Amino acid sequence: MRKGIHPDYRPVVFKDNASEFAILTRSTVKTKETIKWEDGNTYPLAKVEISSASHPFYTGNLRLVDTEGRVEKFKKKYQKFKSSN
């Protein structure tokens, strides 16, 4: 392999914001935060919105993240652009 062209492949902790589930794996993702892991070492932290611990397919229950429907959001967003005829 050529030196200097490949991303840094290192241990990274991925943490689910919704369920506080975390897993240590290897990745090339760039992060600014770090976390102290169970083994006492500090690793880069990548926060994710959803994981197998919070995804409805894996958990079997539905969690509503969005309380407002898509149509209502669209109308609310473009209400100010209505033309006055």
Image (tube, helix red, strand yellow):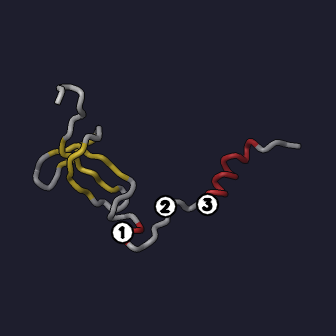
Quadrant of the drawing holding the N terminus: top left
Could you say whether the residue bearing mark 2 is in a helix, strand or loop?
Answer: loop
Give the residue type that dot 3 points to: Gly
Dot placed on the residue nearer the N-terminal end, 2 or 1: 1
Whole-percent x, y for residue 70 in the image:
62, 57
Circle 2 residue = 65
Circle 3 residue = 69
Sort mark 2 into few (<14), some (14-19) or many (20+) by Cα contacts within 10 Å.
few
Whole-percent x, y for residue 76 in the image:
68, 51
Circle 1 residue = 58
Residue at the extreme bottom: 60
Could you say whether the residue bearing mark 3 is in a helix, strand or loop?
Answer: loop
Confirm or deny contact between disc 3 and disc 2 (CB under 8 A): no
Residue at 73 percent across and 47 percent down: it is 79
Q: Quadrant of residue 16?
A: bottom left
Could you say whether the residue bearing mark 1 is in a helix, strand or loop?
Answer: helix
Residue at 24 percent across and 44 percent down: it is 27
Sort mark 3 into few (<14), some (14-19) or many (20+) by Cα contacts within 10 Å.
few
Whole-percent x, y for residue 46 in the image:
30, 46
Q: Quadrant of residue 15?
A: bottom left
Residue at 35 percent across and 51 percent down: it is 48
Residue at 17 percent across and 26 percent down: it is 3
Sort mark 1 into few (<14), some (14-19) or many (20+) by Cα contacts within 10 Å.
few
Quadrant of the drawing holding the C terminus: top right
Whole-percent x, y for residue 71 in the image:
66, 57
Inter-mark Cα distance, 2 to 1: 16 Å
With respect to residue 57, does 46 lie above or below? Answer: above
